[in-house]
Image: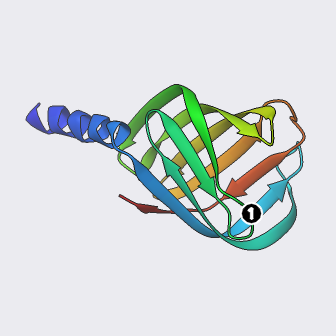
């Protein structure tokens, strides 16, 4: 029983901490989630409870406000899922985005869904800096 309680507190601790995802490859997907193209890009994404900052290698960083944060991890960074809704202001344009961070058997992925452009989907296979 103590092990279950400790595991739950570790998962909650993961959800309450800021972390940084880094990647060197970005995949652009079609609406069927098939890879249309890939791009080398050393990017980082800082995710906190209140804000998300995306820093691409070749473009200016964008910071957005978190409007919703759902976190459900059975084992931190191994099995679970977080769904984060973020509002960015990109060059004066409101851009709502949904981030889906998911791990299955230790394979971590991040989907970036543009709520105003459902045909635009980005996936990365990040590493985590805690």
- Quarter of the image that includes the N terminus: top left
Asked if 64 appears above or below 46 in the picture, the reply is above
Is residue 30 found left or right of 26 in the rendered image?
Answer: right
- Relative image position of residue 55 (x, y in whole percent): 62, 59
Foreground pick, 119 / 76: 119
Residue in view at x 69 percent, y 36 percent: 88
Residue at 49% from the left image edge and 27% from the top image edge: 70
User: Which quadrant of the figure has residue 44?
Assistant: bottom right
The furthest residue to the left = 2
Position above or below: 86 against 10: above
Classify residue 102 as left or right of residue 89: left
Q: Position of residue 120 (x, y in %)?
A: 86, 44
Give the camera-side residue of 124 and 79: 124
Find residue 76 and report its horizontal and vertical position in percent: 35, 47
Q: Say which of 124 and 55 sits in front.
A: 55
The colour scheme is rainbow
At numbered mark 1, what does the secondary structure look like: helix, strand or loop? loop
Q: Residue at x 80, y 42 (%)?
A: 91
Q: Position of residue 78 (x, y in %)?
A: 41, 53
In the rendered image, the vertical position of residue 94 relative to residue 34, given as above or below? above
- Which picture quadrant has residue 42? bottom right
Badge 1 crowding class, 10 Å Cα cut-off, few under 14, some 14 to 19, many 20 or more, is few
Residue furthest front in the image:
92
Which residue appears at 82% of the width and 57% of the height? 28
The C terminus, quarter of image: bottom left
The vertical placement of 55 against 113, above or below, is below
Q: Which residue is mark 1?
A: 59
């Amino acid at each position: 029983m103590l092990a279950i309680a400790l595991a739950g507190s570790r998962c909650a601790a993961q959800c309450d901490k800021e972390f940084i995802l880094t990647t060197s490859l970005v995949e652009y997907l079609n609406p069927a989630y098939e890879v249309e193209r890939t791009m080398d890009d050393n990017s980082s994404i800082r995710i906190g409870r209140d804000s998300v900052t995306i820093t691409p290698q070749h473009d200016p960083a964008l910071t957005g406000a978190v409007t919703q944060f759902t976190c459900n991890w059975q084992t931190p960074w191994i099995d679970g899922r977080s769904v984060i809704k973020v509002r960015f202001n990109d060059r004066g344009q409101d851009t709502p985005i949904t981030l889906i961070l998911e791990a299955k058997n230790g394979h971590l992925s991040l989907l970036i869904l543009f709520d105003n452009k459902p045909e635009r989907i980005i996936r990365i296979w990040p590493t985590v800096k805690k």
